[in-house]
Amino acid sequence: MSTVAVILVVVAVIAVLALVVLAMRRSAEKRRERERERERLRGEVAGHRQEAEAHSVKGAEKKGEAARERRSAAEHAAAAERHAQEAKGRKKRAAEAEERAGREQRASEFHDERATERESDLD
């Protein structure tokens, strides 16, 4: 083989080796980049899981609070119903008392007139 051919083969081998080394570096860099991206995503996943847990706990607390509020509202509604019935009864008794007061007033006036008539008979 001639010297030129040997040099060309050596240059070609060196070029191929350089390309292989370059490809290996790029491949390694891509792997490192993918690993950094995975690590970043793992951090995001952990953060979202933590937030999900916090919201789950808060949701359970709010569910209990809602149940307590519903019970309290039902109790207040029942008390309001009782109060409404009591008020209705008291209004009825007040109307009856007003009616009796009117009758008593008329009876008082009647007897006052009779007393006045009888007084005039005394003279």
Image (cartoon, rainbow, N blue to C red):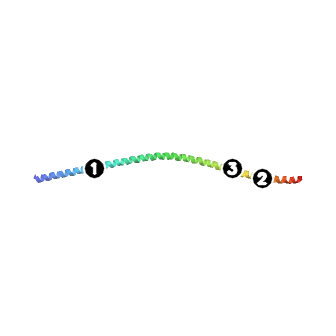
Judge depth for marks 2 and 3 and give the one in front: 2
Report the front residue among 105 and 89.
105
At a point 46% along the width and 46% down the height, the residue shown is: 56
Q: Which residue is mark 3?
A: 90
Report the front residue among 12 and 25.
25
The percent coordinates of residue 64 (x first, y second) are 51, 45
Tell me the crowding category of disc 2: few under 14, some 14 to 19, or many 20 or more residues within 10 angstroms, Cα based. Answer: few
Q: Which residue is mark 2?
A: 105
Tell me the crowding category of disc 3: few under 14, some 14 to 19, or many 20 or more residues within 10 angstroms, Cα based. Answer: few
The percent coordinates of residue 65 (x first, y second) are 52, 46
Q: Which residue is mark 1?
A: 29
Return the disc, 2 or 3, that comes first in the chain's sequence. Answer: 3
Q: Amino acid at mark 3?
A: Arg
Tell me the crowding category of disc 1: few under 14, some 14 to 19, or many 20 or more residues within 10 angstroms, Cα based. Answer: few
Separation of residues labelled 1 and 2 (CA atoms): 109 Å
Secondary element at image label 3: helix
At a point 29% along the width and 48% down the height, the residue shown is: 32
Q: Amino acid at mark 2?
A: Gln
The percent coordinates of residue 69 (x first, y second) are 55, 47
In contact (CB < 8 Å): disc 2 and disc 3: no
The percent coordinates of residue 117 (x first, y second) are 86, 54
- Residue 100 vs residue 17: left or right? right
Secondary element at image label 1: helix
Return the disc, 1 or 2, that comes first in the chain's sequence. Answer: 1
At a point 27% along the width and 49% down the height, the residue shown is: 29
Secondary element at image label 2: helix
Q: Which mark is residue 100?
A: none
